[in-house]
Image (tube, grey):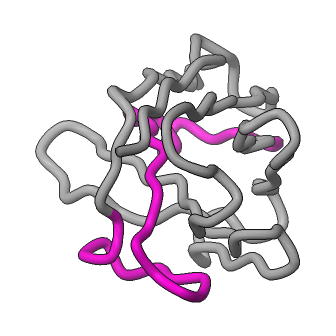
Amino acid sequence: QVQLVESGGGLVQAGGSLRLSCAASGRTFSNYPMGWFRQAPGKEREIVAAISSIGLNTDYADSVKGRFTISRDNAKNTLYLQMNGLKPEDTSVYYCAAARSAIITTARSAYVYWGQGTQVTVSS
């Protein structure tokens, strides 16, 4: 079992930045590829970014490429999402998740542990 707790969400103006954090506890954090997802009201939960277990490989949704950066610090059991150039359409609840996978993955079905989510609201 892996417990995940997100923080860092909030209200920001368009063009601004936020940094989300996800603190992990339980099983060995460095064993798991990780991802950030988001879900807006009335929409499906979608992948934002993914990172391999030791952080060498990353992948991003086209909508956030060049603006968001996923990273991890395995010594601190923490996952991050740096979000720059925020747009109103980025407004969502953001979730971190851990995948039961040997490699980096963007497949939602591979993610078995989830945090409770943190709200990000971008005003125009």
Query: Residue at the spot x=42%, y=42% of the render?
Result: 2
Is 19 magenta? The answer is: no
The image quadrant of residue 20 is top right
Residue at 38 percent across and 29 percent down: it is: 117
Q: In the image shown, does 63 or 22 lie closer to the viewer? A: 22
Residue range of the region highlighted in magenta in the rendering: 84-111
Q: Of residues 70 and 65, which is closer to you in this image? A: 70
* Location of residue 16 in the rendering, given as x and y in whole percent from the top left corner: 80, 27
Task: Left or right? Give the position of 51 relative to 41.
Answer: right
Residue 101 on the magenta span: yes
Q: Is residue 23 left or right of residue 71?
A: left
In the rendered image, the quadrant that contains the C terminus is top right
| Corner quadrant of residue 110 | bottom left
- x%, y% of residue 87? 62, 41
Which residue lies most toward the top here? 11
The vertical placement of 54 against 14, above or below, is below
x, y percent for residue 63 = 59, 68
- Left or right, residue 107 beside residue 96: left
Which quadrant: the N terminus?
A: top left
Q: Toward which corner of the image does residue 62 lie, by quadrant?
A: bottom right
| Residue 26 placement (x, y as % from top left) | 49, 36
Q: How many marks?
A: 0
Which is more toward the observer, 108 or 110? Answer: 110
Q: Which residue lies furthest to the left in this view?
A: 42
> Which residue is farthest front?
27
The answer to which of 81 and 77 lies nearer the viewer is: 77
- Asked if 111 appears above or below 87 in the picture, the reply is below
